[in-house]
Amino acid sequence: MSFYSTQFFIISIMNITTQNQIASYKLQLKSVLSQLKTEYNNLDKENLENDTISPKELHKLREVSKRLNEYCSDVMAYQEKIKFLSAE
């Protein structure tokens, strides 16, 4: 194999790997967005049903809020990774 065909082969493999990484990140992003939507919808339903919030419910809301923030952070990270890999 000549130098140029070897380089082309390596670049082709890198592109396949990059495409696989992008596809993987997109699947993970879709999963996280689904979890985020489910948590948010559940939180919204619970809040609409209650006029007052007990200390126990407030603690639960804090925990859900933390999870929502984590999901949002994950979404942003996956979007950045996809953007970075797509630019290569």
Image (tube, rainbow, N blue to C red):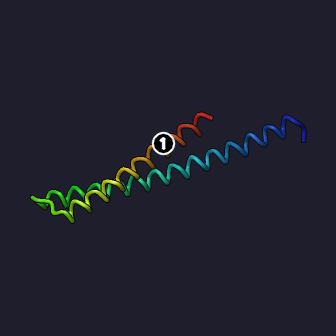
**Measuring 36% from the left and 56% from the top, which residue is drawn there?**
67
The answer to which of 6 and 66 lies nearer the viewer is 66
In this image, 41 relative to 3: left or right? Answer: left
What residue lies at 44% left-to-right and 56% top-to-bottom? 31
Front residue (pair 43, 65): 65
Q: How many marks?
A: 1
Q: Is residue 57 left or right of residue 24?
A: left
Residue 52's x, y, as percent? 11, 59
Residue extending farthest to the right is 1
Position of 47 with respect to 13 (left or right) is left
Q: Residue furthest front?
A: 55
Which residue appears at 49% of the width and 45% of the height? 77
Residue 38: x percent and y percent?
32, 58
Residue where numbered disc 1 is placed: 79
Which residue is more in the foreground, 8 or 34?
34
Return the x and y of residue 46 as percentages of the image width and height: 19, 61
**Dividing the picture into quarters, in which one does residue 9 lie?**
top right
Q: Residue at x 51, y 40 (%)?
A: 80
Nearer to the camera, 44 or 70? 70
Residue 70 drawn at (x, y percent):
40, 52
Q: Residue furthest bottom?
A: 56
Q: Is residue 19 left or right of residue 65?
A: right
